[in-house]
Image: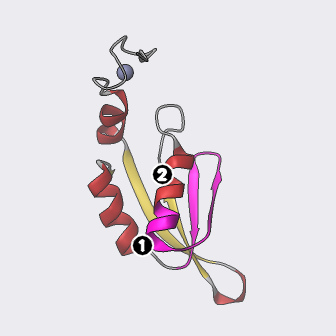
Amino acid sequence: MEICPKCGLPKEACICETLAKSVQKIRVKGIKKKYGKISTQILGMDDKSINLRDIAKELKSELACGGTVKDSMIELQGDHIKKVKEKLIKMGFQVE
Ligand SMILES: [Zn+2]
């Protein structure tokens, strides 16, 4: 059985990530890139308590787009602001 190093509970019972998601204020915004392309940026996630790569992977497969993780920011190719917000809220995040 895996134990969470933060709270000492078994992984199944651990609420650290859920808790982390609900206290973080996430911002989603679109930015203009070169050649008039739009990218969707997700800012404000704490990369110490949230696995940004997992989140990015899920969003990329859901939206069928490309994307990268830079520091504590996820950037997706294309204008997906509305869908990303909906998806993040479903995942348990608080989105501004
Ligand atoms: Zn925990």
Residue 27 locus on image (x, y percent): 42, 57
Q: Which residue is labeled 1 in the image?
A: 81
Q: Is residue 51 magenta?
A: no
Can residue 96 be seen at all in this image of the molecule? no
Q: Secondary structure at mark 1?
A: helix
Q: Dot 1 surroundings within 10 Å: few (below 14), some, or many (20 or more)?
A: some
* Residue at image coords 55%, 79%: 78
The quadrant the C terminus occupies is bottom left
Report the residue that reaches farthest toward the front: 1
> Callout 1, which amino acid?
Ile
* Residue at image coords 30%, 65%: 86
In this rendered view, identify the residue nearer to me: 96 or 80: 80
> Callout 2, which amino acid?
Ile
Residue 1 locus on image (x, y percent): 40, 15
Question: Which residues lie in the magenta part?
Answer: 59-78
Q: Secondary structure at mark 2?
A: helix
